[in-house]
Image (cartoon, rainbow, N blue to C red):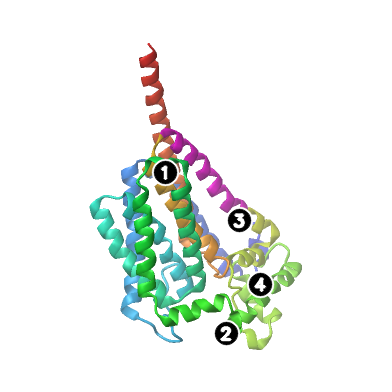
Amino acid sequence: MVATWPIAVDKYLHEKFLTIFVKYLLFIFLISKIVITKKQFEYLIGAFLLGQFYISWVAHSMGRTGQARLENLAGSDTQDANSAAALVATAIPILINYLIIGKKWQKCCSLIIMVFVFNALVLINSRGAFLGLVVASLYYFGFSLLSPAFATFKKYKIIIVLAVGIAGFFYMADQLFWERMATVINPAEEGYTGRERTFFWLTTFDMVRDHPFGAGAFGYQALSPLYLPLESLSSTQTRAVHSMYFQVLAEYGYHGFAIFMVFLFSVFKFSRRIKKDLIRAGSHELYYTSIALEASFLVLIISGVFISILYVEALYWLAAFIGCYNNICSNSAKHINVSVQTKEVEQLA
């Protein structure tokens, strides 16, 4: 973002989001220094889940506003209802995890929040958020059931929660929801958005050819009138690229895209190393919470294929949560391993 600053198409807008991004970095730094115990982390996640509950409650209060879906719903950092849907969907893997390993009051609260989040997803009718949720759920349940640490855990809880969750979602989803989801398989049924989305993506390469170092924050929208036909533009005479990855490519060039992908990869690489330590230490609950956080992060990664969510704060919150939680888990695993080794030495002595 700093490298693209001098050549940004809209310098004012770029400076605005560069300032916001610096705040993200400060936020991540403060989390890593302040939240150092499991109890503190639970407070942090609790606040995060309450935020998703509030947005879902607002969606419930508004209902569908037109075109068989809820429009004009956005949080403080989401530009539209699609990105808001991706945001609230990140709560589901964490809520599922609480239903399995949480205390009784955590299970009750999680169940209530989950109902409202499911309802919000049905009302908003976002295909990108739905696909992100499906992939993230498969990731969580897949790792839970196939993990070597799961042999000593209560498998039936996972299966029951999975069955109840699927049944509950199918009960809440109506015909309008499934009709819109069907356009993922057959885009021609939906209209221009389904047919021309690929065209929007491919246009990114034309922009990058002319702006190899990126066009700056929201540069795709600013340049879209020059690259897209008039009939493809919105009422504001611009068009979003509808993909976080092509958004990065258009706004920050190939070098920015490479840095962004390294960022995403590094989150999972760091988490994978810590999970191995947790398995060796026998810390099963910490292990599954780590998987749940990864699954929440994965919701945004998959949703980002179809939604422009590069500047959604939750993308960086969840990366910070994963890093912070894994630091806590690493210290816990080391403490457990040291205790085990001490006992073994005492027994040998």
Q: Nearer the viewer, mark 3 or mark 1?
A: 1
Callouts 1 and 4 close, C-beta under 8 Å? no
Q: Which residue is mark 4?
A: 201
Give the spatial CA distance, label 2 vs label 1: 43 Å
Q: Is residue 163 visible?
A: yes
Residue 74 location, x and y as percent? 42, 73
> Which element type, helix, strand or loop, lies under badge 2?
helix
Residue in view at x 39 percent, y 19 percent: 344
Q: Which mark is residue 334?
A: none
Q: Is residue 28 visible?
A: no
Residue 302 location, x and y as percent? 54, 63
Q: Which mark is residue 189?
A: 2
Of all residues shown, which one is farthest toward the bottom? 231
Q: Which residue is mark 1?
A: 150
Q: Earlier in the sequence, mark 3 or mark 1?
A: 1
Q: Which mark is residue 260?
A: 3
Q: Residues within 10 Å of mark 1 (few under 14, many from 20)?
A: some
Callouts 2 and 1 close, C-beta under 8 Å? no
Residue in view at x 43 percent, y 86 percent: 66
Type of amino acid under label 3: Phe
Magenta residues (range): 262-281
Give the spatial CA distance, label 4 vs label 2: 20 Å
Residue 183 location, x and y as percent? 55, 79
Residue in view at x 34 percent, y 64 percent: 114
Q: Earlier in the sequence, mark 1 or mark 4?
A: 1
Q: Nearer the viewer, mark 4 or mark 3?
A: 4
Q: Earlier in the sequence, mark 4 or mark 2?
A: 2
Q: Residues within 10 Å of mark 3 (few under 14, many from 20)?
A: some
Q: Is 283 contained in the magenta span?
A: no
**Image: 295 above or below 239:** above
